[in-house]
Amino acid sequence: HAHDEAPAAPSPKVELVLDVSGSMRTRDIDGQSRMVAAKQAFNDVLDAVPEQVQLGIRTLGADYPGEDRKVGCKDTRQLYPVGPLDRTEAKTAVATLAPTGFTPIGPALLGAADDLEGGDGSRRIVLITDGEDTCGPLDPCEVAREIAARGTHLVVDTLGLVPNAKIRQQLTCIAEATGGTYTAVQHKEELSGRVKQLVDRAAEPVVTPVATEGAGSCSGAPELKPGLYTDRAEIAQHRWYRVDVLPGQELRASASVAADRAVDDDYGVLLRAVTAHGREIVRGSEAGTGRTDVISSGLRYPKPEAGDGDDGDGKPAAETVCLQLAHSFSAPASVKKSPGLPVELTVDLVDGPDNASDVAAFGLGRGWWLLGVLVLTGLVAGLLTGWISRWRVAVWRTN
């Protein structure tokens, strides 16, 4: 019966926004013009769009060839409407494009956001451009912030065809304002591969991180269920969280700290699982040096199946595990210390392994057994070496 069927998931919407400004005729991508490379990449992408994705195409700088900035900076239109994809029709529309005018990125983003209005599915704009916006004062970075402030969960991903520092800065700002990504591409295969990846990502369910605030000690820490969380941790600050782990479960936790400002070269991140009484159960740590964007560490803690020690009402007693997060970033005195560095914390509870008691022994995982074997091997080797040396000395004295 039709009424017994589960409701269909809302269709994700994607709009590809293509720069068709005059500079796209430059021949520097695999011996071809940027425009030709973009068209070929679009054909590859259109062939691979998942059925459930509603896809549209918008252009900027495609229609006005004149010199009037006021007119050229309004030059954006929807080339193909957002909806079920007719691949032949979309490819035909793209084939007609020729490098023409200005680069009005801000107006194009506003137009794309309007094109994607409506529905409950995820929304994603993929901007492909070879230059910075030439149509100030409408700053595309401010436009991206305005789009993000609408609360529509619309993500803007940017792809830059020219590895220019100023262009990279602007496209990175647009992407970061909406939780998107920036990618520099200089080959056609890179372009088509990245756009395909972003369209596929729109078709997958997205986990939205939940904001939390770690405490200064375990006793006042927030209780976290399985999920993805965000927080801020200042330099030299320890953040505490709590997770209840039932017998037979394995706690898996990981933390990533982003270096969103100029920090010193040497850094590290530490994630500890501690009992409510302060005894360390297991830890994960990672350290590095040099330029980085994110550093991550994780841990696993399996709790053995309960015997007779339940809480009296037939239910096994959960153990409160305290998670402590600390990082050792440092920064020059001129760098602002507040707010803290962005933290992303993942918590999961899964069925534990059969032999839970020995997986996290002394925080060394199964490496504990390897360590024991190495110690025993070293002891035996030492005894043998000593015995052989004494025997050789004895033989030498006899002779």
Image (tube, grey):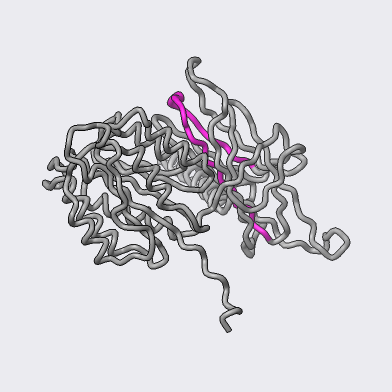
Q: Position of residue 353 (x, y in %)?
A: 62, 62
Magenta region includes residue 306: no
By secondary structure, the bulk of the magenta-drawn segment is best described as strand
Number of dots carrying numbers: 0
In magenta, the rendered stretch is 249-272
> In the image, 129: left or right of 388?
left
Q: Which residue lies most toward the bottom here?
A: 1
**Image coords of residue 21 (percent x, y):** 21, 41
Asked whether 354 or 287 is in front, the reply is: 287
Which residue is depicted at the point 25% across and 60% down?
44
Q: Nearer the viewer, residue 206 or 230?
A: 206
Specify whether 312 is left or right of 92. right
- Residue 347 on image: x %, y %: 61, 50
The image quarter in which residue 354 lies: bottom right
As for residue 270 lying within the magenta part, the answer is yes
**Residue at 29% of width from left, 59% of height from top?**
45
The image position of residue 268, as x and y in percent, is 51, 33
Image height of 302 relative to 388, above or below = below
The answer to whether residue 323 is left or right of residue 334 is right
| Residue 91, placed above or below residue 184 | below
Question: In the picture, which quadrant includes the C terminus?
Answer: top left
Asked whether 83 or 386 is in front, the reply is 83
Q: Residue at x 47, y 37 (%)?
A: 146
Q: Can you say which quadrant of the picture contains the N terminus? A: bottom right
* Residue at (30, 67) in percent of width and height: 86
> In screen coordinates, is 358 left or right of 319?
left
